[in-house]
Amino acid sequence: MPAGGIQPLDPTIVALISAGEVIDSPGAVVRELVENALDAQADRITLSLWTEDDLFSLQVVDNGVGMTVADLAKVGQPHSTSKIRQLQDLYQIRSLGFRGEALHSIAQFSHLTIASRPPGEMGYQMRPGDYAPTPYPMAEGTIVTVTRLFANFAQRRTGLPARSQQLRQIQKLIQEFALLHTSVTWQVALEHRPWFSLWGSKSMAEVLLQIFPKYSATDLREEQQDHLQVVVGLPDRFSRPRPDWIKIAVNGRPVHLPPLEETVLEAFSQTLPRQRFPVCVVHLRVEGETIDWQRHPAKREIYLHNLGEWQQRVARIIRQLLQSPQPSLSSYGKQLFRLAESAADYHPQTPPKILGQLHRTYILVEEGEGLYLVEQHVAHERILFEQLERQWQIVPLPTPLLLSDLSEEQRENLNREGIATVPFGHNTWRITALPRLLVNHPDLTAAVYALSRESSSSAVRARVACLCAVRNGTELDHATMTQIIQGWQKCQVPHTCPHGRPIYFFLGKQKLDNFFRRY
Ligand code: ADP
Ligand code: MG
């Protein structure tokens, strides 16, 4: 941050900064004030929201570096900031704010009071356009109070969504900032009562577990490497009915970056059931020069240089995280959590001990400190699917197959996968070669029709895997069960079948001990 306190920006810089209305809702006020507190390096931020004369009011208290009385006197003037000074600063932005516009706008729309006290100095309070700084007893940090928001802007008030929705937005915003600034403790009050808190933590995973208390550390994986931090919910345990928890952030700020959101969805695509969506937070830390915040006044939309490279890295990390299976199950609590983060701990030292088959559907395996019930069909399906992903082999059929009533789209789906459909008279096609696994299938006609309806390569492979996997209800001998379990343990994604159903249920020793009260 440049030295010299708050100063008005040069008009040439102002002209370059994406102009536009930033303060359009209570949520926007919260966002701007919270960003200021974070820029001031606060690690404790308190937000209070209340209604006064039917109008929205709020206060943000932080324990950051505060402002000198000289700076305080300048707050609320247009385009005045301590965060950038000259043109080149605009290309190396390290702070969340830089336009020097927020407090000025907020002052236009509300009663704004600011009190601040830097370390070792006295506190002062002022109200822009009303009174200059006057001594004010307070702890180090800054208190910004906004009352009667949009009192004289009835139109802006009526354009807002319902109050409950606005509060949800604010809660989401705080949760997002908490995930990106993990060491900060947040306390939020609503109508003078505690609403929610998020404690300062060491990792995104720890914050995420505060937001979703019914999940545990073993339901998440987190990885941090080289300017990139990613936390994911394991698809079979922690997913969402809506795509509302795919969060992308750059340099401590949540952003809207649809191509990267697509990358995340794609990376999860063969692990989640149809109507489920991932939980995934991706935090990039990029150099100021490779990013352009000017695109959108609220800085939600950005230009990111070398986006393609980031997409590849994010996809790779997510794949790695999803491949690290259930950690060694002998440790619990915090220890378990640490193990959960390193994939290396998984590979079992002892061979699996097959205890038997239950309901001709579940293979019972004792391993490490617990019992796995592995659903035989989905486990086998996952094994075959991964084989097919590695090697897709089309071999000739002993007897060609004749199929009728194939639409053009169905034929295209087959041809795309190397399954030729040769015209054979009116509305009939001849198939002479099929995927190797499928050749001995008892109902080839039905199988090929099923494949022809799958519109992507991986859906076709998933379909073949499903058609060829051992059925539930089939009695299995010990050797087959061992084969399935060993194959499953080697799978890259052992948690779910290609359609997203879970493969196993785990009953750990601790759960049993708890049940039998053997502590
Ligand atoms: P910007 O954040 O873009 O600089 P703002 O209008 O949000 O613009 O804030 C103007 C200036 O007020 C900031 O540059 C900063 O110097 C000071 N300021 C605002 N809020 C705080 C705070 N919570 N703690 C310390 N300084 C603050
Ligand atoms: Mg600001």
Image: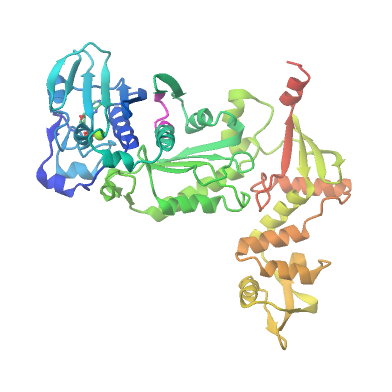
Which quadrant holds residue 508? Answer: top right
Residue lying at 72% horizontally and 89% vertically, measured from the top left: 425
**In which quadrant of this rendering is ligand 2 seen?**
top left
Which quadrant of the rendered structure holds the N terminus?
A: top left
Rendering coords of residue 379 (x, y %): 74, 49
Q: Is 323 on the left-hand or right-hand side of 109?
A: right
Which quadrant holds residue 332? Answer: top right
Residue 199 seen in this snapshot: no
Is 184 inside the magenta-drawn segment? yes
Which quadrant of the rendered structure holds the C terminus?
A: top right
Q: Is 244 on the left-hand or right-hand side of 166?
A: right
Q: Nearer the viewer, residue 243 or 246?
A: 243
Residue lying at 81% horizontally and 54% vertically, measured from the top left: 471
Is 463 inside the magenta-drawn segment? no
Residue lying at 61% horizontally and 66% vertically, measured from the top left: 455
What residue occupies the far top of the structure in this picture?
137
In the depicted structure, whether residue 484 falls above or below residue 30: below
Q: Nearer the viewer, residue 507 or 452?
A: 452
In the depicted structure, whether residue 484 falls above or below residue 98: below
Which stretch is magenta?
Answer: 178-187
Which quadrant holds residue 286? Answer: top left
Rendering coords of residue 151 (x, y %): 25, 32
Q: Is 464 on the left-hand or right-hand side of 112?
A: right
Rendering coords of residue 337 (x, y %): 58, 29
